[in-house]
């Protein structure tokens, strides 16, 4: 990846923390790697993202997981591919009562396999699992994200 593109993506990730749906939901990107194949996101439970029973609002738990697999693929596949979130399913396992985290990661081999499949088939929907966990690693929610990828 060229240095100009890298700076652009770093700026985008930093701005994401000020994106109103994230800012006002207490969501922050707290870590990512240099190749943009890994992201870690945190949601702090606050008065403005609590639900009626005092736990994390389900929409905020989902929002913290929404774009990251799509981001990883857009950045790493490049401009020759169209990448869109297609569907998601979330299962709330346990109430989110404090700070929670989610991590998103694809290996370079995963990305290369996706590229090869799309080059061969023209388009495909890929499903990626994700977990939201508390500070002790207990599962709060599990998700599956469907991401559509097509060759331009």
Image: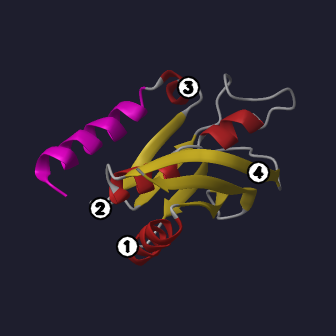
Q: Quadrant of residue 7?
A: top left
Query: In the rendered image, which residue does mark 4 sit on?
Result: 89
Q: Is residue 3 magenta?
A: yes
Mark 2 residue element: loop
The span from disc 3 to disc 2 (Cα, nearest Å) is 25 Å
From the viewer's side, name the closer residue of 45 and 70.
Answer: 70
Q: Given this view, does label 1 or label 2 mark the residue nearer the observer?
A: 1
Q: Quadrant of residue 44?
A: top right
Task: State the residue lying farthest toward the right.
Answer: 53
Mark 2 crowd level (few <14, some 14–19, many ≥20, 10 Å Cα): few
**Residue at image point 80% right, 29% down:** 51
Q: Given this view, does label 4 or label 3 mark the residue nearer the observer?
A: 4
Q: Which residues are magenta?
A: 1-18
Is 132 above or below relative to 86?
Answer: below
The span from disc 4 to disc 3 (Cα, nearest Å) is 20 Å
The span from disc 1 to disc 3 (Cα, nearest Å) is 30 Å
From the viewer's side, name the closer residue of 56 and 84.
Answer: 84
Q: Earlier in the sequence, mark 1 or mark 2?
A: 2
Q: Are marks 3 and 2 in contact (CB under 8 Å)?
A: no
Mark 4 residue element: strand
Q: Earlier in the sequence, mark 4 or mark 2?
A: 2
From the viewer's side, name the closer residue of 87 and 55.
Answer: 87
Query: In the rendered image, which residue does mark 3 sit on?
Result: 21
């Amino acid at each position: 990846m060229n240095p100009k593109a890298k700076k652009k993506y770093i700026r985008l990730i930093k701005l994401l923390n000020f994106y109103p749906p994230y800012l006002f939901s207490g969501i922050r990107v707290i870590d990512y790697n240099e190749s943009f194949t890994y992201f870690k996101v945190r949601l702090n439970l606050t008065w403005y993202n609590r639900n009626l029973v005092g736990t994390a609002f389900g929409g905020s738990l989902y929002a913290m997981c929404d774009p990251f697999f799509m981001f990883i693929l857009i950045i790493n596949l490049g401009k020759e591919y169209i990448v869109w979130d297609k569907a998601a399913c979330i299962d709330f396992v346990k109430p989110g009562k404090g700070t929670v985290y989610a991590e998103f990661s694809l290996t370079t081999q995963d990305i290369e396999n996706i590229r090869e499949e799309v080059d061969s088939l023209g388009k495909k929907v890929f499903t990626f699992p994700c977990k939201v966990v508390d500070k002790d690693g207990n599962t709060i929610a599990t998700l599956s994200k469907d991401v559509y990828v097509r060759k331009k």
